[in-house]
Image: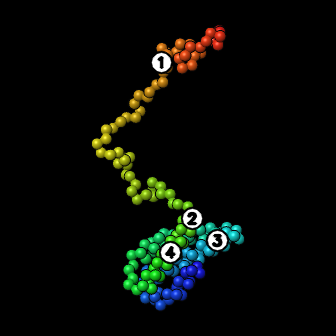
């Protein structure tokens, strides 16, 4: 947060001429950075209800920050001070996003939520594939080859010495 305030203070004249998207991105970044600090402070105090609330806010802030970073990369500045500010802000964005990625678990996309949900199981089979009835396929049976067994007490078809044979 101190670094962010220093960047804004140094380039204050440049920030007034920034596009609106850049100003909004800086606000989102500052808000997320403050919430990360509040989260760690609540963690030290073991204030679990506040941690849960901040956790949900940070979960909502992560996609915003990623979108703001991609918008910021698309903006082209001719002023060298603005380009320096853009580089410093992108470093701060990436740092905050990395913190959030470390705090938040990765999202698991289920089949119900995926945008490319198959309409039926037939769409999973490529066209031209012959139909195979799985129920009627013969399963291999493991029957021992009787010709290989010399003595039921032998191992791997080898003869068992007479003194070691089991007498019945």
Mark in front: 2 vs 4: 4
Residue at the extreme right of the image, as rendered: 45
Q: Could you give the CA–CA distance between mark 4 and mark 3, rounded to whole angstroms?
A: 21 Å
C-beta proximity under 8 Å, tags 1 and 2: no
Q: Could you give the CA–CA distance between mark 3 and mark 2, rounded to whole angstroms?
A: 13 Å
C-beta proximity under 8 Å, tags 3 and 2: no
Residue 70 rendering spot, x and y as whole percentages: 43, 72
Q: Earlier in the sequence, mark 3 or mark 1?
A: 3
As rendered, which of 57 and 27 lies closer to the eye?
Answer: 27
Q: Of helix, strand and loop, which one carries label 4?
A: helix
In screen coordinates, is 23 left or right of 3? left
Q: Earlier in the sequence, mark 3 or mark 2?
A: 3
Q: Earlier in the sequence, mark 1 or mark 4?
A: 4
Q: Could you give the CA–CA distance between mark 1 and mark 4, rounded to whole angstroms?
A: 70 Å
Residue 101 is drawn in which quadrant? Answer: bottom right
Label ID, residue 40: 3
Q: Could you give the CA–CA distance between mark 1 and mark 2, rounded to whole angstroms?
A: 59 Å
**Residue at image mark 2:** 102
Label ID, residue 91: 4
Q: Tag count in the figure?
A: 4
Mark in front: 1 vs 4: 4
Label ID, residue 67: none
Mark in front: 3 vs 1: 1
Q: Earlier in the sequence, mark 2 or mark 4?
A: 4
**Residue occupying image coordinates x 59% and y 74%:** 35
In screen coordinates, is 42 left or right of 148? right
Q: Of helix, strand and loop, which one carries label 3?
A: helix
Q: Earlier in the sequence, mark 1 or mark 2?
A: 2
Residue 5 rendering spot, x and y as whole percentages: 56, 83
**Residue at image mark 1:** 145
């Amino acid at each position: 947060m101190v670094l962010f305030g220093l960047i804004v203070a140094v380039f204050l004249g440049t920030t007034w001429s920034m596009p609106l998207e850049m100003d909004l991105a800086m606000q989102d970044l500052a808000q997320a950075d403050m919430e990360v600090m509040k989260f760690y402070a609540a963690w030290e105090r073991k204030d679990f209800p506040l941690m849960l609330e901040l956790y949900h806010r940070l979960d909502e802030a992560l996609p915003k920050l990623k979108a703001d970073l991609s918008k910021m990369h698309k903006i082209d500045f001719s002023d060298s001070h603005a380009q320096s500010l853009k580089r410093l802000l992108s470093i701060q964005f990436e740092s905050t996003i990395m913190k959030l990625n470390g705090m938040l678990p990765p999202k698991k996309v289920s089949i119900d939520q995926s945008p490319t949900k198959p309409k039926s199981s037939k769409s999973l089979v490529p066209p031209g594939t012959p139909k195979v009835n799985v129920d009627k396929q013969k399963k291999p049976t493991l029957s021992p080859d009787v010709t290989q067994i010399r003595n039921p007490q032998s191992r791997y078809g080898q003869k068992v010495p007479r003194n070691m044979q089991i007498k019945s």
